[in-house]
Amino acid sequence: MEVTAARIQELTGKLPQLKNEIQKVIVGQDQVIEEIIVALLAGGHCLLEGVPGLAKTLMVRTLSRALHLSFHRIQFTPDLMPTDIVGTEILEEDHATGKRFFKFNRGPLFANIVLADEINRTPPKTQAALLEAMQEFEVTYGGKTYALDRPFFILATQNPIEQAGTYPLPEAQLDRFLLYVKIGYPTAEEENNILSSTTGNKKADVQPVLDAGDIQQLQSLVRDVNISEELIRYVSAIIRATRPDTSQVEAVKDFVSWGSGPRAGQALILTSKARALLKGRYAVIMEDIHAMAAPVLRHRILMNFKAEAENISSDNITAKLLQAIERPKGKL
């Protein structure tokens, strides 16, 4: 169904309201909130990383309150099993006929928004239970396939893997996350505001702004946002330059084991379109690509041992790529 101009204006006008509702609870972290909303609009999933106490879980809960969607939280622990996430079959009896049958009991994965809290505290076998859901938006159990509710959005949190009792996420699973968002410490002023606002009796009243239909229409609108052929070629050049066997960037050759695949380019274009829409524009500009490059590539560039020894991160490589790759000519 074609969306009218008035409906487009109504939907895009709700995006600043969504951000405002989240900021009733979350002090600061403007860029993090923006990147989470971008992932939602682009129809992808988001991985949030930060040390304990930076309100990762609270941020996701607040987002769920600002959206009229079903929400489930899964606390990942070392003894969590795949069936605890996906669901399991239980034996039931038809009281009328006395016949017994298996019925699939849906797990907490069946919701519009799923908070996978501390995802790196559970073993890889359980982490892998999310792979099909994240890519295909469905789960298979006992030879049957069950479709997940749409929109479907996984927000996973993790503490830095250097901390005890954690399991690094496999590369295949990391690649399923559209964005890898790092949460830093607040500024002194923000921390003062946090301490003031969270130690009293006053509670923020967060109101839902968007429902499932609104979000699905916005996700469709994102794909209609215009991007020029010059910017598409620019994105392609960035992605290809992450690969050490073909890159002309010395830092990539020195510090990168594996570069990004085509999915990274798709993610960078799609999130750039989503950011443009969030900013009230219907065309991608250079600023959008540069803003989304780090969270898109952060988990898609595999660093080597030399990089670890010299404390060179994938963010450092992304910054060098944006400096080294020739930008398209003209006003973009």
Image: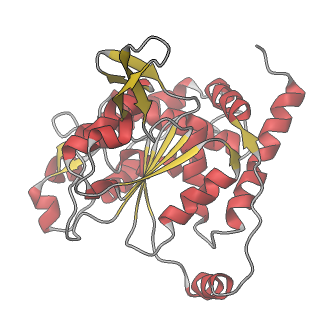
Q: Residue at x 13, y 53 (%)?
A: 304
Q: Quadrant of the N terminus?
A: top right
Percent x, y of residue 4: 85, 22
Q: Is residue 151 above or below residue 20?
A: above
Is residue 123 shown above or below 283?
below
**Residue 46 or residue 238, whichever sits in front:** 46
Residue furthest to the top in view is 97
Farthest residue toward the right? 6
* Screen quadrant of the C terminus: top right
Image colouring: secondary structure
Compared across the picture, whether 20 is left or right of 263 comes to right
The location of residue 73, given as percent across then percent down, is 48, 52
Q: Is residue 37 left or right of residue 3?
A: left
* Any part of residue 213 in sight: yes
Q: State how many labels appear.
A: 0
**Residue at screen point 34% across, 43% down:** 84
Which residue is painted at 72% across and 68% down in the image? 24
| Front residue (pair 102, 232) | 102
Q: Position of residue 71 (x, y in %)?
A: 57, 46
Q: Quadrant of residue 319?
A: bottom left
Rendered image quadrant of residue 277: top right
Task: Using the rendered image of the protein, determine whether residue 175 is visible from the camera's viewpoint.
Answer: no
Residue 219 location (% of width, % of height): 63, 31
Vertical side of 285 occupied by 191: above or below: below
